[in-house]
Image (spheres, coloured by chain):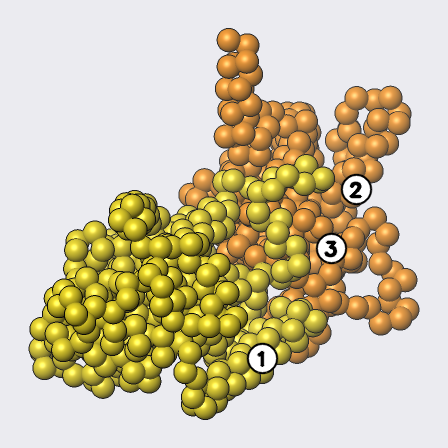
Amino acid sequence: MSLFSRFMDGWRKYRKPGYYDEFDYHWTMAIDLDKCTGCQACMTACQAENNIPIVGEEELARGREIQWIRVERYWEGEYPNAKLSFIPIMCQHCDSAPCETVCPVSATYHNQDGLNTQIYNRCIGTRSCAVYCPYEVRYFNYYDHHWDSPLEQQLNPDVTVRGKGVMEKCTFCIQRIREAKDHAKDDGRRRVQDGEVQPACVQTCPSKALVFGDRKDSENEVSVAINDPRKYRVLDELNTDSSVFYLKKVDA
Amino acid sequence: MVAETNNLGYTDIHEDVVRSIVKTGPKYYIALATAGGTTLLCFFFPWFYQLYYGIGAAGMNHPGVWGTYLASFIFWIGLSHSGTLLSCVLHLTNSSWRKAMYRSAEAMTLFSLVVAATYVMVHVGRPWFIHWALPYPNQMELWPNFRSPLMFDVMAITTYITGSTIFIYMGSIPDFAAVRDRTSGWRNTMYTLLSLGWRGTDKEWHRLHWAYTFLAVLIIPLAVSVHSIVSWDFAMSIVPALHQTIFAPYFVVGAIYSGTAGIVTVMFVLRKYMGFERYITKLHFDNLGKLLLVLSLLWTYINAVELFTSWYSGTSEEYEAVGFKLFGFYAPLYWEMILFCAVAPLLMFSTRFRTSFMPMLILSIVINIGMYTERFLIIATSLPRQYLPDAWGVYVPSAVEVSIMVGSFALFTTLFLVFVKIFPSVSMYEVKETMATPKLGSVAPASGSPA
């Protein structure tokens, strides 16, 4: 019986997306589109923090730009009455992520913090995760990228520089999360406090439209934000169970 | 069959087939050199260039991360389908007309699979780590992801390659023995090893027949499952135009369709240039033509169902995907595909068309051009039109991709040219089964008896 129940337990864990019954942390982001001005500072901050290569004019024209977070723009109506709306899109860290099931080598998987992680060393470059992702937030390194001297001096030492042939995407600045968790451990505290971790985009947002935190504690700023009646998730009908919540822009 | 070959004796068959292996004219060497050279120049050279600089040498971009490499992969897997599958089905249904052509059809299966497997390595970003997709015990203590349809694919294709290799090899053993008894030197050594000491006793024939039928039964579901699984690479995604339950039968029918057309092409070439006019006859073209006609109708039906399902879904993203396919950037290719694969094959309703060699050759090539287009369109019209319009784009293949595609045909031809000099490309013993038993005086030495 014990062997059987252990087997069934293991099987159930295996069948669960992400292999975890419960996450240690449940990192979540809330984006208030009412506050977002579309200034794209988040994109720049992300570029600097995560060593995102600048692919150059030619590659950009071929549609091979790498932007872990991008501000999508949508126009409605014709010129005099045109209306512009925009929405920052990054990896939604879905709890039922289509990209995780398809990777043949498990290079992308769900970790114990509810993050959808990408292991660059394990990636063999089938690019199937990018096909399966409905948000189109996975970017592929078509070439080895280089930084002209002295620009390589500004690379973030906490983040890998990705080589050719691997997929990459937003990590919710996992290096900062790891750092905060290490600090928490060193201080003898059990958990990371609210506000202790901020991804680069959240840190830099001038209008504080982006809020980041652990959803497991209902007191946290992000937990309050995602209980707002304006909340919605992009492509929620696909049941990806994403971790990025948007707060609807209300027209005056 | 019997009626057309009754002026043939057992000796004629042996002599014809052994001659095709032993006697090599300058034309063969020119063909081999051309095919081999083209393979090096158009396949391996651009591939090494791509390995060195990165997959950016191909035309893939942000929404269109898959391209012709994967289309070619499906195409070659599809082409592989008819060989062994058709051979098995015809073996089990006792269709005697299969016997003259099945060996080359099975070889086609094998070499298409080899080319397809090579394409997997061309396709991925870091092919030097491709072995990570295989489940082998390793010091990293990591397994591949068994939930991944790509993983199923690796399993299915390796099984299929193994199965078809054993099938073609086992069916050739008596013929290896026959060639062994009629050759000398290194060829004799090679065929001695390959024929595994075949002597042609009743017991051996009995066991061969039993094992052969067993494998034939085993391979049919395997072949069907392989292409279903290839289709799941697409159908298990949530990409609007790909997420359809019809995909598995769609791919299987498409595979058999293009594979059968491929057999017609190969049979024409064998007949014309390898001197097998007496074995591959109008009857074969007539029968394969009927099969092709049925498959083309089935294919057309499934295409209609695919469009209907998209329309019936009533979602904007499906409408967008279908609209892009029918009237978008690649619309001319779509209508070309319809013309080549759905309209042109209707000519085969005419018996006169089916029994003329040259029109059948042209049609078979046209069908395969159409089927390649189909595989390309599945990828090139779906991925660039997904849910978020901001991430839409257009994917256009690069020169490297086109070159590798041309080179893959040369690679296939090279492998096939090597094959016809090693394997008896017509199954001698089974052709003999269709013939009237000769009078005792004129019996050629049976395989295994001292030559």
Mark 3 neighbour class, 10 Å CA radius: few under 14, some 14 to 19, many 20 or more: many
Mark 2 neighbour class, 10 Å CA radius: few under 14, some 14 to 19, many 20 or more: some
Q: Which mark is residue A176?
A: 2
Marks 2, 3 in one chain: yes
Identify the residue at image location x=60%, y=42%.
B136
At label 3, the amino acid type is: Cys
Name the residue nearer the viewer: B348 or B184.
B184
- The residue to which callout 3 is attached is A46
Q: Is residue B113 above or below residue A25?
A: below
Host chain of mark 1: B
Q: CA distance from mark 3 to mark 1?
A: 44 Å
Where, quadrant-wise, is the C terminus of chain B in this rendering?
bottom left
Q: Which of the two discs, 2 and 3, labels the residue nearer the N terminus?
A: 3
Name the residue nearer the viewer: B377 or A61.
B377
Q: CA distance from mark 2 to mark 3?
A: 13 Å
Q: CA distance from mark 1 to mark 2?
A: 49 Å
At label 2, the amino acid type is: Arg
Q: Which chain is the one coloured orange? A: A
Residue B304 showing in the rendered view: no
Identify the residue at image location x=24%, y=62%.
B430
Q: Which chain is the one coloured yellow? A: B
